[in-house]
Amino acid sequence: KNRYTNLPLTVLFGSSPRREKILAVEILSQEGHENAVPLLLDALGKFRNDELLHIKILHALGKSGSMEAVPTLLDSFADSRVAIRLASVKSLALFQNLGAAFYKQAFARYRIVEELKSLFRREESESVRAAIVAVFSQLEAPDVVPFLLSVLKESSPIVQAKCISVCAQFHDPTVAYYIEPYIHNPHSLIAATAAAALYNINRSYRERSREVLENLLESKKPQAREAALAALATVEADWCGRTLLNFVTSPHQSERFHAALGLARQGDTRGCELLAEQVVTGSSADIVRFHDSFRTFSHTVQKKIGGYLSVAVSHHIRMFLKKHPHDALEHLAAPDLERFIMLYEILERYQEASDLQEALDEKR
């Protein structure tokens, strides 16, 4: 085990290029490395100015699930960089059974709740605020519910919708009382999310929820249809699957993406294949949305999508090299490099991701 740990440590703290250091961090985040967390904490301080490596280390600390890493993750909430704050919150979300694990560490859990609430109040980034709300769904703390209800009343549409989704995860029929007023909200994202949540929570709301979602799907506004499709992805009902199938051939890329995402979540083989193609050919924003959803899929569905995604990525790279036989992947445009880096990381093919990251850094 010592030899297994010493090699990546030598790479991480030595003079190796960044791509090898990133691979070393990934190796250290895997099981079997003794005392990896203190070493990763040391590395975090050493590479504070390297944003990408800093984010990778935060992610590794989150995967470790070690209470020793929690104070550093919380301290990172004060970082001036949005990307670091977002990575810190998402790393905290990686802890398995967050509430149960902290049940015997009452003071640690109290600080986590307070730090999350404090960051939420001062944070301007909607991505960070939405990530904070998602973490609250994992905490078993008595003041989480009052906080979520206050967020539900005072936040932006994006965060309100996220908050509704989180409240629905409590599987408490009484939560319908608090969500029901939002089912006819003028903002389509809020209305669609509330309708889907109520459909899943309480059978008495199903007819009304379905009517709201179907009306949004018939809207002339693309944003309304997209919101409804995203909400349908969270509803397990036969009629939802049939509706999603109708949109996989939509002329609008965002609608095809959300339809495929919903089908894939349900384990539909065609949906998994279509989603892989949509992700590879879509925008960086699509990949981010996919990655956030991918973590919530069952292991079986993740494995199925991963297989199709690996084939789709390899195919598109082969097509690029066939079209440009004298060019290397490094000659891709910066937006394309960013997309393939993100895809390789989802597939945990870190060597390829690191090589392309180096090429992207040289372009900047």
Image: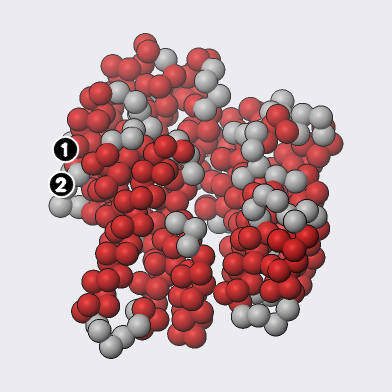
SS category of the residue bearing label 2: loop
Labelled disc at residue 249? 2
- The reply to whether residue 145 is visible in this rendering is yes
Task: Specify the amino acid type for callout 2.
Answer: Thr
Name which residue lies at 39% across and 39% down: 301
Q: Is residue 317 above or below residue 124?
A: below
Residue at far top of view:
204
Q: Can you tell which quarter of the image residue 267 is in?
A: top left
Q: Are marks 1 and 2 in contact (CB under 8 Å)?
A: yes
CA gap between label 1 and label 2 equals 7 Å
Give, as a three-letter code, the residue at label 1: Asn
Against 59, residue 214 (above or below) is: above
Q: Nearer the viewer, residue 197 or 18?
A: 18
**Callout 1 secondary element:** helix
How would you rate the neighbour count of disc 1 (Cα within 10 Å): few for under 14, some for 14-19, many for 20 or more?
Answer: few
Name the mark on residue 246.
Answer: 1
Q: Position of residue 278 (x, y in %)?
A: 28, 54
x 52%, y 20%: residue: 171
Residue under the point 35% across and 28% down: 235
Q: Sort mark 2 into few (<14), some (14-19) or many (20+) by Cα contacts within 10 Å.
A: some
Which quadrant, please, contains the N terminus?
Answer: bottom right
The residue under the point 53% across, 33% down is 166
Side (left or right) of 69 relative to 276: right
- Quick check: can you spot residue 217? no
Residue 58, horizontal then vertical, whole percent: 66, 58
Find residue 340 and report its horizontal and vertical position in percent. Answer: 39, 67
Kindly indicate the quadrant of the structure image that contains residue 298.
top left
Q: Nearer the viewer, residue 176 or 259?
A: 259
User: Picture coordinates of residue 63 (x, y %)?
Assistant: 64, 49
